[in-house]
Amino acid sequence: MAVIYTRVSTKEQAETNQSLETQLERCRLYAERHGYEVAQTFGGTYESAKNDERKHFQLMLDFVRKSRLRVGYIIVYSHDRFSRSGSNAIYITDQLSQLGIAVVAVTQPVDTMTASGKLQQNIQFLFSQFDNDQRREKCVAGMEAKVRKGYLVGKAPMGYDQLKVNGEQVIKANKQGKLIRLAFQLKAEQGLSNTDIIQRLKAQGLALYNQTLTKIFRNPFYCGLITHGLLEEGEVIEGRHEPLVSRDTFLRVNGLQAQNAHGYTQVKEDEQLPLRHHIRCGSCQKPLTGYEMKKKGIHYYKCNTKGCCLNRNAGKMHELYEDLLQEYQVDPILLPQVQEMMSQVFKRLSQDHEQEEKRLKLQLSELKKRYETLERRYAYGEIEREIFQKFGGELKVEEREVEASIEKLSGPLSNHQMLLEKGLKMMLTLSLSWRNSDASKRRRLQALVFPEGVQYDREKEAYRTTRVNSFFGLASEISQKMGQKERGKSSVETDFSLLVARRGIEPLLPE
Ligand SMILES: [Zn+2]
């Protein structure tokens, strides 16, 4: 049994014929052709409706997970329709494959039962993310320019209305703005507590939580400045909007705020425990949870299974993890050679694609011939109209499917140089980037490199990896072999090109 998942961006829909209807139709045909019964269809949302999209995606995942044995396939139009984030898609498909569920793309047929097929699918996922990143970069560049000119990007904070006058952005203080100004003044001039200020504002019709007020007091937008995640840390820009309070007032309020700073140095537990659920207990396979020893402010990872008693200092576990990532780093000296080798793998894969393309083209001309024959027989009255319509229609459907496959085949791998450079660049500083990232970025990196997480072996006090992303696995292996050769440690002269060519179609990593 199978489910169908469709997704489209409004832009794309306008430009090509990948509309939701087309996607759905193609997916249905695919299911029919392979004899899969469609249990349910999901999606049908536009990318611009991000929350909706996430909801539908989650619904679909819940459905297939719950029905475990019944649903074996998630049918999508193409791999980039499955998920926009490549690493996330790789992570999810890996998890699904453990449940015996495969993601199949109608227009990008890969055999995910083989290692090379899996690598190919991963590459396609990475590519769709790469596309997205690029789109975002473009978009971000435009946004940054806007911010630097003093325009507000995003929603105006409370107290301001955002208007458009002759196509120009105009930000004006509203009624609430006046009360917010009052709040600043009460704080700066009379030194009132937040609670008192909140009461005064409430009496005038503005109800605020303490947290909201604290946030307002810390937002320099109210004194005419703009800060933004796109700017350098600490960088502020003179905004085009009218300030509600003077800079002096703003600074005084923040000076006062800092004095009674209780409550806003809250550290989210997750921030300190990025490896939660990523590490599994080596004894019982359960994902580790984490907690904070409040008195000392020290974090720990812990296995919750009764009798396991695995409990480790988070700092130590993080150091160990950095060591682990270090193993997958590519030595910068070897980078050109590794890149060359990897490039050969990609070429090999594109050759596979080319072969597949040839095969499909042959199939296509065969189908066309068969249709002509059928048509001729009908024209000479050798067969009935119904027969012609039935079989002719079937042939046409098949033709369209093959054509779509051909269309898509040339896509992802033709661009491999960019992905290669991006991936390898990441691998130069894998450990360091993990250390210097915030928790959410760390988590993404973790899932990308080790899609199934890692296990902690308490006897050896070390991590065990079950599966490594084939790209990283292969690149690091090449790098290590090259390093051995450089240092003269490898006595046998390895023909790397041969090795790589072979590895491209054999299991890439110890399973
Ligand atoms: Zn355990």
Image (cartoon, helix red, strand yellow):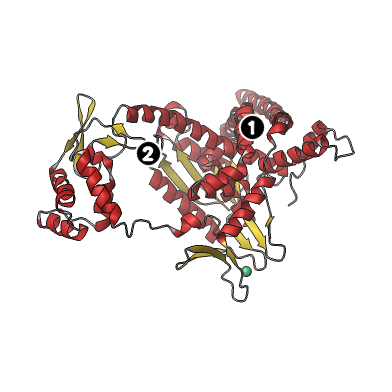
Relative horizontal placement of residue 370, taking residue 255 as reference (left or right): right
| Residue 97, image x, y percentages | 63, 52
Q: In this view, does 51 lie above or below 169?
A: below
In the foreground, 125 or 35: 125
Disc 1 residue: CB within 8 Å of ligand 1: no
Instruction: Please tell me how crowded label 1 is: few (under 14), some (14-19), or many (20+) other residues with Cα within 10 Å.
Output: some
Q: Do the residues labelled 2 and 1 touch (CB within 8 Å)?
A: no
Outermost residue, bottom side: 307
In the foreground, 432 or 155: 432
Which secondary structure, mark 1?
A: helix
Task: Indicate which label's residue lies in the foreground, 2 or 1.
Answer: 2
Residue type, label 2: Gly
Dot 2 corresponds to which residue?
A: 234
Residue type, label 1: Leu
Dot 1 corresponds to which residue?
A: 420
Which secondary structure, mark 2?
A: loop
